[in-house]
Amino acid sequence: MNTQPIGIFDSGIGGTSIFKEIHAFLPHENTIYLADSKNAPYGQKTKEEIIALSIKNTELLLEKNCKLIVVACNTATTNAIKILRDTYNVPFIGIEPAIKPAALNTKTKTIGILATKGTLSSELFHNTTDVYTNSIKILEQVGEGIVLLIEAGKANSVEMKALLETYIKPMIIADIDYLVLGCTHYPYIIPTLLELLPKHVKIIDSGLAVAKQTKSILEQYELLNSSARIPENIFYSNSNVAVLESVLEGKFKVSHLGF
Ligand code: DGL
């Protein structure tokens, strides 16, 4: 049982930022990653559409015998994880914007959050935000267009810089000291964000927290891989194999799969 793979899915290549954290933290685990790039971005879709896509991805990973599923997508987590947990009999790990550490540590009492429309409009996001941000000003910004540029291999391009400038400028004027990245694609735009943000603004994402949580749940269910064999890390994309390979820096092979 414990040699079964961890399943990971995202609307595209963004969840590889989570895969990398998991792989560094749990190097002995077998993994299967699904990039549903054909249907990206999820962030502009309705809750019902996001749930249907999340079910499709989950069922494919379960057919491939996964022991635990990481929903490496804030949009899918905030809209669909409850239904997934209620429907399937494996543990699910989700990812949500790291509002809590930003809210607890901000000195200017002002934080920015960049995420998809689907995440920012979700009930789960609002419930979390309401708990931690009583006396804090939050600037919520929908990152429209960012995922599409990243999926096109233009994570740190001139177009990206121009787009991000429009999103970040109002946050700088409002004096944020934390910027929360609420989408697993966004770690790939950190180089451009660093060019735009004042030095004192800290960028935070939830990748490491997800890896730690994955380990702790595997321990709890006694599912850690104890085999001494070299693990397999398998990647499937239903659209742009080359861009997925490039964010993996050529370290892993990617196969095309229709799903
Ligand atoms: N990586 C997804 C997330 O974390 C991207 C969403 C999208 O496809 O719009 O929200």
Image (spheres, rainbow, N blue to C red):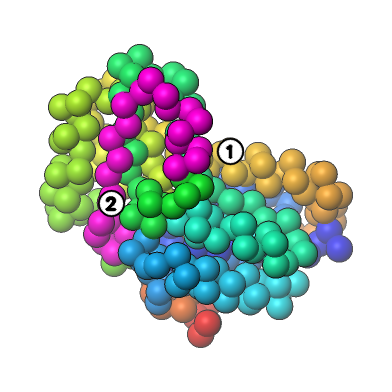
Q: Residue at x 75, y 72 (%)?
A: 65
Q: Is residue 40 above or below residue 213?
A: below
Q: Residues within 10 Å of mark 1 (few under 14, many from 20)?
A: some
Asked whether the viewer can see residue 180, the reply is yes
Distance between the alpha carbons at the discs numbered 1 and 2: 22 Å
**Is residue 51 depicted above or below 207 in this figure?**
below
In the image, what residue occupies the spot 22% across and 32% down? 171
At which x and y percent is residue 234?
61, 68
Amino acid type assigned to the residue bearing label 1 in the image: Ala
SS under mark 2: loop
**Which image quarter holds the N terminus?**
bottom right
Up-down relation of residue 88 to residue 206 (above or below): below
Percent position of residue 225, x then y: 81, 54
Helix, strand or loop at disc 1?
A: helix
Please state which amino acid type lies under the numbered disc 2.
Gly
Question: Mark 2 — residue?
Answer: 143
**28 with respect to 54 (left or right):** right
Q: Which residues are magenta?
A: 126-149
Q: Which mark is residue 130?
A: none
Which residue is denoted by mark 1 in the rendering? 209
Residue at the farthest bottom position: 258
- x and y percent of residue 61 in the render? 65, 71
